[in-house]
């Protein structure tokens, strides 16, 4: 009777019926076939316990599933990875990179730099000539490369503090002497500005005041190697409101630095420095007392009719050319860095401009730089203690170089070398393909972080 009556229940209760049949069958061993009220209560109690247990497990499973879905909700950028190509992947890489460099982010006060993607004729096309990324003006290439993978780079121009305009103007090498010819610099940069101002609103919005350019040439943004011409031409009108990263810097008024700027070092290949130091350790034998290799005019004037280096090099040559303590060479030598690594003092006289690549090479290879360039302003003074690691000799005192160097050698040379050989000093003057904490590009970014008052974004936030 019990079976037939149960079979008459509606179909929707069939699952429950099956369950009951299973429980009754399972409990036949323990309970009498015709049990009393106590056995029936035991059966009901067992069923309720099992029902409650399964209900509890199902509830817990639903709870954890819903919690997972809420806390792991896909972000729009994550969803877009499967449907878009380059930009989302770069954003993901940047986020990963930033997560491991939080200290530097704090150092730079959250600074963000947007890098324009210009047509290749403005930059990468020039790299077909291998000299482009290795000569003394190549900081324009090195800074661009390093910023591309830097933690401060942003792919969203609306969140940028500054805008970097990558134009390589010093890779146009002369067929006459092989030196970079920068006569096309003004027109090339002007053309690049036309491109960025027509495609995006940021140049016109600030008139270029938050835009960054590199001018790693003799007289910086004046774009000429001869000072008189550089002064006469001045800085192009379209760059006068921008920020210029330039090797030229002096401690007096000069039209070629009459613009917001950061003084940077000339480019010396870190790879070449490492190769030299592998063969001649920085604290190794130094059998050359005073070293110089480079252009030295025998006559006060060169073929252009202009005074070269204010005749300083000519005086050095005439005064110390036959002095055994001075190792002076006029001709080029591919392995000259090995000579610097053997030298105690390295002469760094001005050429057409006050600065010289010898400043970086001397410091990088542990040779005390002897700076002969009145009024020169040196790069990154907060990171490089120039007064403690170098000597400064006035241009008018160059004839007294011998006694001056002898005096230093007999008094405080050891103290100078101890500070000069600090690895952090060398690092601050070398550009790497990727930003390294404390290196030259890192110093550039740090300097930019002190100019955040020029950022439209920061100004808007502070005013709000």
Image (cartoon, helix red, strand yellow):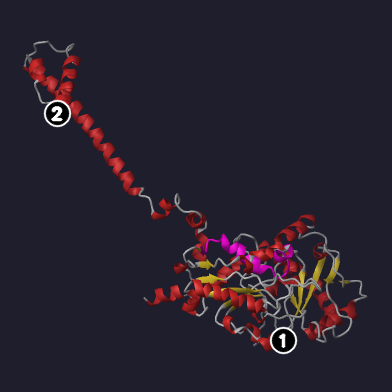
User: On the picture, is 448 further left or further right than 65?
Assistant: right
Residue 134, magenta (yes or no)? yes
User: On the picture, is 266 further left or further right than 450?
Assistant: right
In this view, the residue in front, 420 or 412, is 420
Q: Quadrant of the C terminus?
A: bottom left
Q: Which residues are magenta?
A: 130-153
Along the polypeptide, which appears first: circle 2 or circle 1? 2
The numbered disc on residue 12 is 2
The numbered disc on residue 427 is none
Q: Secondary structure at mark 2?
A: helix
**Can residue 271 be seen at all in this image of the molecule?**
yes
**Can residue 412 be seen at all in this image of the molecule?**
no
Report which residue position mark 1 lands on: 229
In this view, the residue in front, 443 or 139, is 139
> Are there few (<14), some (14-19), or many (20+) residues within 10 Å of tag 1?
few
Which residue appears farthest toward the right when viewing the image? 322
Residue 100, magenta (yes or no)? no
Between the C-alphas of marks 2 and 1, the distance is 99 Å
- Name above or below for residue 186 compared with residue 166: below
- Name above or below for residue 412 compared with residue 375: above
> Are there few (<14), some (14-19), or many (20+) residues within 10 Å of tag 2?
few
Location of residue 402 (image quadrant): bottom right
Q: Mark 2–mark 1 contact, CB under 8 Å?
A: no
In this view, the residue in front, 209 or 49, is 209
- The picture places residue 359, in percent across and down from the top left corner, at 73, 71
User: On the picture, is 212 further left or further right than 169?
Assistant: left
- The picture places residue 397, in percent across and down from the top left corner, at 81, 84
In this view, the residue in front, 77 or 37, is 77
Location of residue 39 (image quadrant): top left
Q: Residue at x 52, y 66 (%)?
A: 107
């Amino acid at each position: 009777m019990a079976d037939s009556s149960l079979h008459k229940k509606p179909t929707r209760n069939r699952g429950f019926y099956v369950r009951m049949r299973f429980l009754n069958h399972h409990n036949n061993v323990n309970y009498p076939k015709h049990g009393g009220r106590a056995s029936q209560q035991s059966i009901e109690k067992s069923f309720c316990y099992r029902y409650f247990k399964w209900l509890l497990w199902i509830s817990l499973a639903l709870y954890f599933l819903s919690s997972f879905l809420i806390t792991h909700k896909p972000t729009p950028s994550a969803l877009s990875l499967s449907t878009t190509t380059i930009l989302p992947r770069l954003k993901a890489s940047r986020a990963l990179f930033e997560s491991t460099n939080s200290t530097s982010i704090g150092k730079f006060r959250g600074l963000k730099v947007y890098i324009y993607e210009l047509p290749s004729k403005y930059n990468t096309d020039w790299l077909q000539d291998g000299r482009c990324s290795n000569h003394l003006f190549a900081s324009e290439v090195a800074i661009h490369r390093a910023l591309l993978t830097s933690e401060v780079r942003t792919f969203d121009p609306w969140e940028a503090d500054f805008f970097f305009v990558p134009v390589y103007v010093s890779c146009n090498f002369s067929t006459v002497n092989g030196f970079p010819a920068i006569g096309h610099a003004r027109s090339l940069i002007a053309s690049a500005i036309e491109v960025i101002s027509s495609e995006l609103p940021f140049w016109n919005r600030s008139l270029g005041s938050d835009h960054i350019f590199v001018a790693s040439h003799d007289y910086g943004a004046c774009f000429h190697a001869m000072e008189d011409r550089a002064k006469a031409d001045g800085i192009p009108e379209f760059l006068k409101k921008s920020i210029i990263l330039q090797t030229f810097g002096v401690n007096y008024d000069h039209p070629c630095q009459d613009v917001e700027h950061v003084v940077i070092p000339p480019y010396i290949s870190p790879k070449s420095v490492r190769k030299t130091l592998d063969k001649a350790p920085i604290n190794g034998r130094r059998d050359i007392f005073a070293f110089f290799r480079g252009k030295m005019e025998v006559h006060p004037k060169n073929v252009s009719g202009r005074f070269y280096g204010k005749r300083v090099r000519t005086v050095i040559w005439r005064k110390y050319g036959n002095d055994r303590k001075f190792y002076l060479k006029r001709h080029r030598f591919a392995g000259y860095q090995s000579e610097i690594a053997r030298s105690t003092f390295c002469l760094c006289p001005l050429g057409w401009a006050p600065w010289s690549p010898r400043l970086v090479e001397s410091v990088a290879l542990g040779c005390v730089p002897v700076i002969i360039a009145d009024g020169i302003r040196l790069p990154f003074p907060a990171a490089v203690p120039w007064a403690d690691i170098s000597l400064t000799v006035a241009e008018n005192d160059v004839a007294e170089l011998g006694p001056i160097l002898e005096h230093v050698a007999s008094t405080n040379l050891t103290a100078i070398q101890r500070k000069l050989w600090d690895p952090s000093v060398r690092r601050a003057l070398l550009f790497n393909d990727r930003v390294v904490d404390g290196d030259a590009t890192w110093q550039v970014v740090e300097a930019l972080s002190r100019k955040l008052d020029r950022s439209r974004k920061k100004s808007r936030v502070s005013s709000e």
